[in-house]
Amino acid sequence: MQGVVSKNYRELEFHQAVLEVVESVMPVVLATPAYQDAKILERLVEPERVIMFRVPWIDDRGEVQINRGFRVEMNSAIGPYKGGLRFHPTVNLGVLKFLAFEQVFKNSLTTLSMGGGKGGSDFNPKGKSDNEVMWFCQSFMNELFRHIGPETDIPAGDIGVGAREIGYLFGQYKRLANRFSAVLTGKGLEYGGSLIRLEATGYGAVYFAREMLATRGQSVEDKVAAISGSGNVAQHTAEKLLQLGAKVITLSDSAGTIVDQNGIDEEKLAWVMELKNVRRGRIRDYAEKFTGAKYLTDTKPWGVPCDLAFPSATQNEIDRNDAETLVNNGCICVSEGANMPTAPEGVDIFLENKILYGPGKAANAGGVAVSGLEMAQNRGFLHWPRDEVDQRLQQIMHAIHENCVKYGKNGDFVNYVQGANVAGFVKVADAMLKQGVV
Ligand code: NDP
Ligand code: 2IT
């Protein structure tokens, strides 16, 4: 860890992600001399390649703007680099290295053949016109296109990159490469996208919660759920929870939280989707639209009593206090739609209190898993029906849960952090061993 900290100066999120994995897998590494001789851990923390580039573009007023673009190609031991693109002002190399590192183990858990990568830019899509977003995406792809390919590196969406951005990125790739290839996932259904990819991360996080609850003879039905965020993952977590009979009482964005003790039903959720995906508005409007709902400025949802929590916004959104509040208010299950949303001190609280805690690399793996299914369909020139993709997603989330139990069971308690880290690690480490020092 000392080496990681000094060599990756000030990349705090990257240190955090590495430390958590190292703590989990150390007993396995110590028990396996071959891993030590081959310096598997030392190699895992060094990206195979990092690409960093200038993204110049011209805004609607004619002013030149410059952003920074990145792609972190972390590990390709078990498949081509795979992982999303994030467009958000907080994006920097350290954040993308943490996300790429997490992606390596997450993708390993999916049971599919995908290595780990992540990319993005400090571009802020908020308040930009569709044209500005298009110019930016085209300029971003002008450099990225030479580094990606269906057998090399296949990006997808993440924060700030949804259907609109993937469309513009795909269009520019196709134009530059003169090839209609499966180089991105999350594509529109008209041009090679898969049914259920849009919904997959949120649905998967609920399926994972269902698996965890079943180990204690419980179900999602009639439970009260708090969700953070109001983007892709939060919306489809809410949708699946409603289908399974839970009551959803919160959503949020970076400015605050709405609490609706009457429940956010299908109709209200459809309104939120239109607000967020079409009008690109703020969640605070919900409280003005629906009587009985309140808006809490600058507040996260974790103070609202709930049975189930689905952090679905961003990293480190649950600190020690939030975790204590959740547990003290009776929360029995946390399933992470976001990547690393719980700070290490919060994770300790969940584990000490032995609640059902599903870390992001297991609980939100449904998104990238269906990306893998999109790639499989593209390879076969096929388009599977909605039910078939959904069934496969449920099977994958079940398999991930089983694997976490296999490596994380300790007496009658399952430590899903340990389970996910060790299960994800072993497959990648064994592949690296077999491929020699590369
Ligand atoms: P979206 O851009 O669709 O939505 C992001 C949501 O999170 C918005 O409500 C946004 O609020 C909020 N948010 C973003 N940054 C912050 C912040 N710093 N503080 C508070 N709230 C914030 O992204 P997704 O729903 O796709 O992603 C959400 C999380 O899920 C991320 O952690 C992502 O890495 C993870 N994830 C996504 C997958 C996918 O398939 N899309 C797959 C697996 C994980 P605001 O509008 O105010 O910015
Ligand atoms: O964090 C993630 O797993 C994603 N943003 C989805 C990645 C993908 O390639 O679908």
Image (spheres, rainbow, N blue to C red):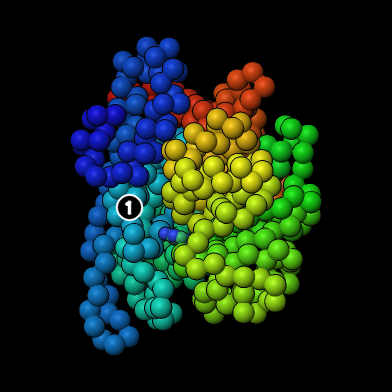
Task: Say whether residue 91 is left or right of residue 398.
Answer: left
Residue bearing the label numbered 1: 71
| Figure quadrant of residue 172 | bottom left
The C terminus: image quadrant? top left
> Which residue type does callout 1 highlight?
Arg
Could you say where residue 93 lies in the image, as x and y percent from the top left? 28, 51
Q: Residue at x 56, y 53 (%)?
A: 302
- x, y percentage for residue 61? 29, 87
173 on left or right of 263: left
Depth check, front residue: 273 or 54:
273
For this rendering, which residue is in front, 172 or 204? 204
Residue pictured at 37% horizontal, 18% vertical: 35
Please determine whether, in this image, residue 69 is positioned above or below residue 65.
above
Query: Is 115 on the left-hand or right-hand side of 13?
Result: right
Name the foreground residue: 188 vs 128: 128
Residue that appears at 50% across and 61% down: 299
